[in-house]
Amino acid sequence: MSERSERTTSRYTEFYPELYRSPISIFWWLERRSYLLFVLRELSSLFVAWSVVYLLLFINAVRQGDAQYREFLDWAASPWLLVLNLVSLVFVTFHAVTWFNLTPQAMAVRLRGRRVPRSWIAGSAYLGWIVVSAFVAWLLVGA
Amino acid sequence: MARRSPEPLVWLAFSAGGVASALLLPILLLLLAVAVPLGWVSPPDHDHLLAVVRHPITRLALFAGFALALVHAGHRLRYTLYDGLQIKHLKAQIAMLCYGTAAAGSVVAAYLLFIAV
């Protein structure tokens, strides 16, 4: 008792074991494949943003006239932009696949009191994706 | 009355943006950023594209899709920066930057789709 009180009164420490958190490397996501996939999925946000910027630039060229539209297409065919857009396409598709795979987790659909099987929900999400893609493709290049 | 957090609304926009970007972006990018520039598909006629973009439903759908996709990306990037780079002491600045950029992009999209085209 006397020894303890002596220690607490005589020595002051800034070390609080209960507040200590071991430092985590900023490369923690390289340790496991699942971590890496998680971070890649999160990084897809950058490419989603770039895709929107690219499409806005496309619309801007279209509104300016036929010549500007052709010029934009030539610019889009430059190697660095093609590489960036191909990488973006991969990431955006990765986002879409992981997103649709998660829909059964996010939505619990009930029909006549019974829970609709997960595969049906994911399946209808993919079906919707196909329908929208086909419609957009028809609208742009098929019509 | 207790002050309500805007967080649930942001998550709602995040989900809607996730759906919008998953449905629209892959096909648009595949056609307009890869297939047409590479010459796999002949470029759509300029008049046809202008007519498509000027249709009221296209304007609304594209604006909603673009704005939600930008909020989605900003929100996701915000948490990626928190967890990945562990810069939690810059929380407010990161949130401002991510949502601010998304808002600015949405304004540009609204201008392009509703006024300029």
Image (spheres, coloured by chain):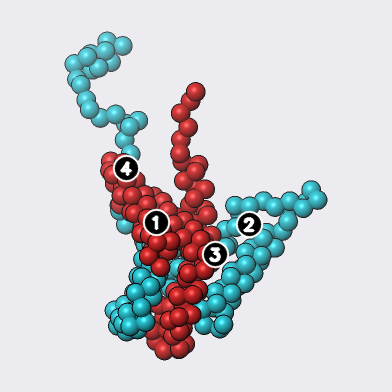
Tag nearer the camera, 4 or 3: 3
- Residue under circle 4? B91
Are circles 2 and 1 on residues that touch, CB within 8 Å? no
Query: How far apart are the two marked residues, 3 and 2, measured between alpha carbons?
Result: 29 Å
Dot 3 crowding, Cα within 10 Å, few <14, some 14–19, many 20+: few
- Colour in which chain B is drawn: red
> Residue B10 appears at what percent x and percent y?
46, 46
Residue A54 vs residue B117, the one in the foreground: B117
- Residue under circle 3? B57
Residue A29 vs residue B59, the one in the foreground: B59
Q: Is residue A121 left or right of residue A78?
A: right
Q: Secondary structure at mark 2?
A: helix
**Chain under callout 3:** B
Residue at 50% over, 42% down:
B8
> Residue B92 appears at what percent x and percent y?
31, 41
Residue at 49% over, 58% down:
B64
Q: Are marks 2 and 1 on the same chain?
A: no
- Colour in which chain A is drawn: cyan
- Residue under circle 2? A104
**Chain under callout 4:** B
**Chain under callout 1:** B
Q: Secondary structure at mark 1?
A: helix
- Residue under circle 1? B106
Residue kind at label 4, given as amino acid type = Lys
Q: Are marks 3 and 2 on the same chain?
A: no
Tag nearer the camera, 1 or 3: 3
Query: How far apart are the two marked residues, 1 and 4, measured between alpha carbons?
Result: 23 Å
Q: Is residue B107 left or right of residue A143?
A: left
Q: Is residue B73 visible?
A: no
Residue at 33% over, 39% down:
A21
Q: Earlier in the sequence, mark 1 or mark 3?
A: 3
